[in-house]
Amino acid sequence: MHETIYSFWHLCDPQRPLNVVMSGISYCDKSYRIERHGENLFSFEYIIDGSGVLEIDSQTLRPQKNDVYFLTRDSDHLYYADEERPWTKIWVVFYGEFAEYLFRQYLPSDTFLVKDCNILSYMNEIIHLSSVPQKSYSDLIDEVSVILLKIVLQLKNHLAHKVLSAAEQIKLCLDVNIENKLDMNDVGAELGYSKNYVIQLFREAYGITPYAYFRKRKLELAEQYLLNTHLTINEISAKLNFADQHYFSSAFKSVFGVSPSEYRKATKKTPKSPE
């Protein structure tokens, strides 16, 4: 067995809303076996090939090629590779308030395995960022925070692929495109409804127009970026596809009562730069 591991233990700061502890790729053999009890860690592990067993919180799961399993804070877990077809897997270990938020907001508390969900491109991006020697830890955390959000949203939406009501389909479309520009004509065209019918269905189901919901979710995500990354106000505005920074600041202030920069200063949760 061999592994490529990038460790950031020595840079972790409990005051940060997110810390990346380690990332890497494991080429397992039949001896591979990990057991933990109640540690303050989260992880995503994507199976590139092979199979194995995960025992976690009284569940026995069998992650195999193209599956994602995740480990959560305070869980008791044991996982090991199959003797004949051991795992090749890519993984990241992290913790912090932002990690808590992502899991609490988007993933079921009793789910630890998502079948047939390819997140390899995101995981490869994390490994690439981890391997850049001149990258500061603060920059790494900012960029990985965004990738983790994308992973969580893909897992959430993959789990939600069931028979959805029309209103749930509209809501899913809005959630998936939260960082993009989106017009209700586009949503209607994708789902086969008229723009007016989309608005009517959504309002009847959720008591709010899809426009208002989409704007509200964008601003909630902007709040998380302000709290948990070093992205500038202009970068957050651009990332969330607001028309310009002035419009973003105005929209944010109308909901939170202060401008984005004032909000960031007032919360005093901006991640510290490593010394």
Image (cartoon, rainbow, N blue to C red):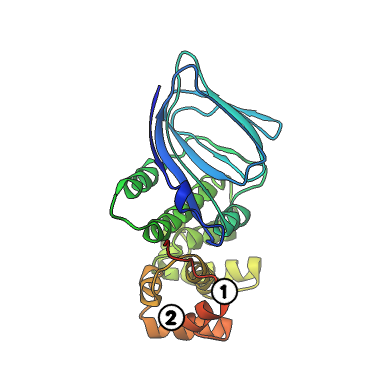
Q: In the rendered image, which residue does mark 2 sit on?
A: 248
Type of the residue with mark 1: Thr
Q: Is residue 157 left or right of residue 205?
A: left
The residue lying at 36 percent from left, 47 percent from top is 130
Image spot of residue 202 (x, y percent): 58, 67
> In x, y percent, where is residue 198?
52, 67
Q: Quadrant of residue 184?
A: bottom left
Left/right of residue 254 with respect to residue 5 in the rendered view: right
Rendered position, 202 above or below 12: below
- The crowd level at tag 2 (other Cα within 10 Å; few <14, some 14-19, many 20+) is many
Of the 4 image quadrants, the one containing the N terminus is top left
How far apart in space, not on screen, are marks 1 and 2 (Cα)?
A: 20 Å
- Ranked by sequence position, the earlier of labels 1 and 2 is 1
Establish if 206 lies above or below 47. below
Q: Where residue 113 sits in the image (x, y, percent)?
A: 57, 37
Give amino acid for label 2.
Answer: Phe
Q: Residues within 10 Å of mark 1 (few under 14, many from 20)?
A: some
Up-down relation of residue 167 to residue 226 (above or below): above
Quadrant in the picture for the C terminus = bottom left
Residue sitting at x 62%, y 47%: 40
Name the image quarter holding residue 206.
bottom right
Residue drawn at point x = 46 percent, y = 64 percent = 178
> In the image, residue 268 lies at what x, y percent?
55, 74
Query: 101 or 183, which is in the foreground?
Result: 101
Residue, disc 1: 209
Question: Left or right: 104 with respect to 190?
Answer: right
- Quadrant of the image occupied by residue 80: top right
Q: Please tell me whether mark 2 sits on a helix, a strand or a loop.
A: helix
Residue at 43% of width from left, 80% of height from top?
248
Outermost residue to the right: 58
User: In this view of the protein, which residue sits in the foreground, 257 or 25?
Assistant: 25
